[in-house]
Image (spheres, coloured by chain):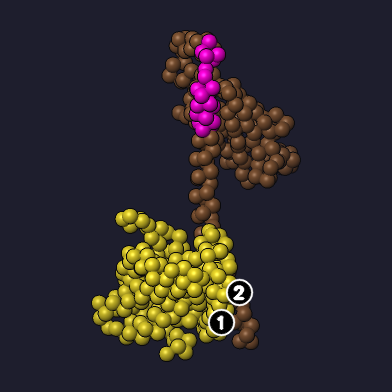
Chain colours: A brown, B yellow
Amino acid sequence: MRLNFYVKLLITLLFLNWLPAVHAHKVKLFATVIGDKIEGYVYFPGGERAQSVTVKITFIDNRLVETVTTNEHGEFQFHVKCRATYRLIADIGEGHFAEYIIDSNELSDSLPTLATEKQPAVSAPPAAMNQENQSFSQQQLIDLIEKSVSKQLKPLREQLEAYQEKIFIHDVLGGVGYIFGVMGLLFYIAKRRSH
Amino acid sequence: MHIADGVLSAPVLITGIALSIAGVGYGLQRLDYERIPQVAVLSSAFFVASLIHLPIGFSNIHLILNGLLGLILGWAAFPALAIALFLQAILFGFGGISSLGVNVFNMALPAILCFYLCHHAARRAQHESLQFLYGFLAGSLAIIFSTCLIALSLFLSGEGFIRLIQLMFLAHIPVMIVEGIITGFIIVFLQQVRPELLAAPVPSCD
């Protein structure tokens, strides 16, 4: 009985050994919004994609919306029905999971918001908008495009900002490390000279 | 306090590099085996201190600490400052690579002057207020000297000297005060906890 368990364990381990997921120490998830679709992929640092990984899509309060599975390229997509902040979680087990937050601001304005999801009234405006479309002056159109572009760029800018902050801290620590490295070198030279 | 690339003229740059190489060489030659970690710690302190900007009224300042380095390290301040300034230049673009020699010299010479002016007195001072005073003097004098040297390097490269030095002095008055106070406190603190740091056999400088 006991032996049986160990054999099973061994076989499982051997089998798991073939999965790239086990070799990775960390998994990452990247997602973007295109219209009303969330598209993304799950990958390991270094670039390899994670296939057949279940990605849980939940609201920010952890209510499950849907689960999707990545295809052979590690990609997944999901149609959003309402405007809300989503949390995407890819769990490959063994405590390795990746999380990505899609802010409600990134999603198209035309989608109903989470609170008003059930109100049918929301579906009316698009028709009205269509009629207006023709009467847009060039200036209005330019304004609209600029507004929408800046809206799309905002999360990117924020990410970049956070990233720069991180780089700065790494550089500071790296610099201190260099100084101590030079200290070691001086010790080495001094030691050799004294011999 | 860091001069960027493309501001100084070639003769100034070359003189700065030559003087800095000489200074670093002399500093390394005088560097005791036992004092290497101390140099590294103070070099890191200088490296990090310049990156922390403190908002003060209308502008923000950052600590320089070259007075403290000079006071404790003596001639070893030259290599310590050279490494820290080099890393600041390549990692953060604080000061240019070509002007590195001038920057090192402008920081290190005041440090060494402070060492000769204040080290002996700060070491011997028994009373806390006196220790603080010498620390304060070292910290603020180093800034004054550095400001003068920077103004001089700019002047030699063809800028109007008097106006420059006025501007730089005004801008650096808060730095001088803050720097002096902090160096003063550090010296008092060191005299209490690790007096041997100051009293250590400084490589044949006395």
Give the residue displayed 54% in from the left and 60% down from the top. B93
Give the residue displayed 43% in from the left and 69% down from the top. B160
Judge whether residue A177 is colored magenta.
no
Q: Chain of mark 1?
A: B
Q: In front here: A66 or B104?
A: B104
Asked whether disc 2 touches disc 1, contact meaning CB atoms under 8 Å apart, the reply is no
Q: Is residue B142 left or right of residue A156?
A: left
Magenta segment, prevailing SS (helix, strand or loop): helix
Q: From what the image shows, is residue A112 above or below residue A61?
A: above
Q: In front here: A27 or A133?
A: A133
Q: From what the image shows, is residue B94 above or below residue A2?
A: below
Which numbered disc covers residue A185?
A: 2
Q: Chain of mark 2?
A: A
Q: Secondary structure at mark 2?
A: helix
Neighbor class of circle 1 (other Cα within 10 Å; few <14, some 14-19, many 20+) is some
Q: CA distance from mark 2 to mark 1?
A: 20 Å
Q: Is residue B190 at least partly visible in the picture?
A: no
The reply to whether label 2 and label 1 mark residues of one chain is no
Q: From what the image shows, is residue B116 above or below residue A179?
A: below
Picture coordinates of residue B38, whole percent (x, y): 47, 75
The residue labelled by disc 1 is: B22
Image quadrant holding the N terminus of chain A, namely: top right
Q: Secondary structure at mark 1?
A: helix
In the image, what residue type sits under mark 2? Leu
Picture coordinates of residue B185, whole percent (x, y): 32, 71
Picture coordinates of residue A36, whole percent (x, y): 57, 22
Instruction: Give, as a single range, the part of the protein colored magenta.
Output: A131-152
Picture coordinates of residue B79, whole percent (x, y): 53, 76
